[in-house]
Image (spheres, coloured by chain):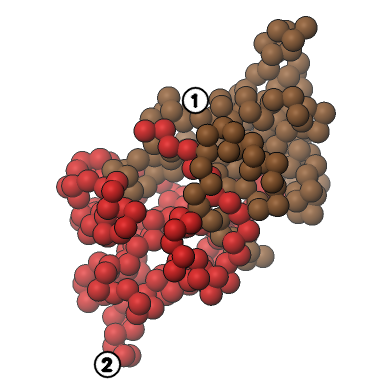
Chain colours: A red, B brown
Amino acid sequence: MESHYVLSLLLRRAREDDVPAIVAMLADDPLGAQREGDPGDERYLAAFERIDADPYNELIVAERDGKVVGTMQLTYLAGLSRLGAERCQIEAVRVAAPERGRGLGRKMIQWAVDRARARGCAMVQLTSDRSRTDAHRFYDSLGFTASHVGYKLRLD
Amino acid sequence: MESHYVLSLLLRRAREDDVPAIVAMLADDPLGAQREGDPGDERYLAAFERIDADPYNELIVAERDGKVVGTMQLTYLAGLSRLGAERCQIEAVRVAAPERGRGLGRKMIQWAVDRARARGCAMVQLTSDRSRTDAHRFYDSLGFTASHVGYKLRLD
């Protein structure tokens, strides 16, 4: 039943034992496939611990029927700009392959926006690779403005 | 003398008494003018204190001959992506009006990139408003790739 389907969705902070499922989603992606390693690599666990201990950082998972089916990371950025406003930055948004096209990504982003608003953030921001044109339509439809150019400089 | 001029430049973490000078630079900008308030507003000081206490956040000033002439903010972002790599995000880059066009911005960004590399960051990232075309040429010339679209959703 659709009503049960919706009700069984849970968004929550990730736990250590979610890390392999999160890494698997990061890797199951046209861009991510080239840059991720073994989900059991201890560097993933070290990064999880750093995020988990940081009061301004939240690694989130979407869980449906006990299974992790989505992830995103929220960082609450302080800054002097705009009268010292806090911003919420969303990164590493992924939906598990069997769940794609069913509205889960939309629910996740709306949840993140609501969470940022409840915290008093003045803005939600994210960047999306130029090649992800489906994602661009998705963020446009959620009311985001493509006002910026995102620059990256790889050091490795 | 040019040699003295260069040698007198100091990049360092901001102190509380730098806040008014930083806010003045944020406001002295075509976009910033519309969104900043009185440099003495206590919300700026509260934001400074939050940044200063955060081990993953650095508010930087450029000082020449004892005067603050530039600012930028560096945030070290944890994430699971790319084997748990840390990224350095640069925000709120400003150069005081009398210093513009003299290479200070370039020195600041190169310093930030060196600092990120020394820390072991895998990437430096930033976004720039689409209207700042001079800034885009500047970041291109520093080796950055305009690979992403930057989305913002204002909540205020």
| Residue B131 image position (x, y, % from top left) | 70, 52
Residue tagged 1: B114
**Amino acid type of the residue tagged 2 in the rendering:** Met
* Residue under the image location 30 percent in, 59 percent down: A29
Mark 2 Cα-neighbour bin, 10 Å: few <14, some 14–19, many ≥20: few
**Amino acid type of the residue tagged 1 in the rendering:** Asp
- Which image quadrant for residue A99? bottom left
| Residue A64 image position (x, y, % from top left) | 26, 75
Q: Chain of mark 1?
A: B
| Residue B6 image position (x, y, % from top left) | 69, 13
Residue tagged 2: A1
Is residue B54 placed above or below B152 in the rendered structure?
above
* Residue under the image location 63 percent in, 58 percent down: A147
Is residue B11 placed above or below A80 in the rendered structure?
above
Mark 1 Cα-neighbour bin, 10 Å: few <14, some 14–19, many ≥20: some
* Residue under the image location 47 percent in, 52 percent down: A75
* Residue under the image location 43 percent in, 61 percent down: A132
Q: Is residue A93 visible?
A: yes
Is residue A99 placed above or below B138 in the rendered structure?
below
Q: Nearer the viewer, residue B62 or B134?
A: B134
| Residue B113 image position (x, y, % from top left) | 51, 30
Could you tell me how far apart the alpha carbons at marks 1 and 2 are, in whole angstroms?
55 Å
Instruction: Give the side of residue A76 with respect to residue B99, left or right.
Output: left
Q: Chain of mark 2?
A: A
Instruction: Give the side of residue A17 with respect to residue A5, left or right.
Output: left
Question: Dividing the image into 4 quarters, which one contains the N terminus of chain B?
Answer: top right
Tag in front: 1 or 2: 1
Question: Dividing the image into 4 quarters, which one contains the C terminus of chain B?
Answer: bottom right
